[in-house]
Amino acid sequence: MISLKDIRLDFGGAPVLDGVDVSVEEGDRVCLLGINGAGKSSLIKVMAGIVAPDGGKVLWRSGARITFLPQDVPQDIHGKVLDVVLGDGGGSSGEDKLQAAREILARQDLDETAEFGAL
């Protein structure tokens, strides 16, 4: 799905990423662990195409869809949790999408009727 080769990134100081190689294939589950400032978020932003690396190559498989969820919860999102997850007010979703969203929220022990801002 995505391959990073010899990725380098700095923000004017010491390198945040220096020679990073990563491959993620369809179906892989990835977890990044490290201390604050180790480059975890920067790596994800490079993978998602939000930040361009200073060097190296990022290769995405044709048709791959990469999304990014920021660490900070946006303060301008309002509505019920289920509606926010569905992204369309809940009214126009297909039954399969609705059921999948409800299952995910249940696994996370989130009340779908709660106000998003109260999370």
Image (cartoon, rainbow, N blue to C red):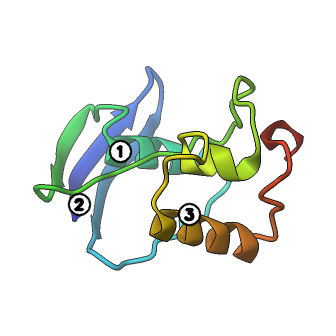
Residue type at tag 2? Ile
Judge from the rendering whether residue 1 lies leftward or rightward of residue 41; answer left or right: left
Give the CA separation, mark 1 to mark 2.
Answer: 10 Å
Q: Is residue 96 left or right of residue 46?
A: right
Work out whether 24 lies above or below 10.
below
Q: Mark 2 — residue?
A: 2
Q: Are marks 3 and 2 in contact (CB under 8 Å)?
A: no
69 horizontally vs 7: left or right? right
Q: Earlier in the sequence, mark 1 or mark 3?
A: 1
What's the residue at 45%, 60% (across, down)? 94
Q: x and y percent of residue 5 in the render?
A: 19, 55
| Foreground pick, 104 / 69 | 104
Is residue 14 in sight in this rendering? Answer: yes
Position in image of residue 19 (x %, y %): 29, 52
Find the residue positioned furthest to the right: 118
Q: Are marks 1 and 3 in contact (CB under 8 Å)?
A: no
* Local SS, label 1: helix
Pick the residue in front: 84 or 91.
91
Dot 1 corresponds to which residue? 48
Mark closer to the chain start, 1 or 2: 2
Query: Element type at marker 2?
Result: strand
Label disc, if present, on residue 98 of the rendered structure: 3
Looking at the picture, which amino acid does disc 1 mark?
Ala
Image coordinates of residue 108 in percent, x first then y, are 74, 70
For label 3, the crowd category at 10 Å Cα-Cα, with few meaning under 14, some 14 to 19 and many 20 or more, is: some
Helix, strand or loop at label 3? It is: helix
Mark 3 residue type? Leu
Residue at the (47%, 25%) spot, across then down = 13
Q: Residues within 10 Å of mark 2 (few under 14, many from 20)?
A: some
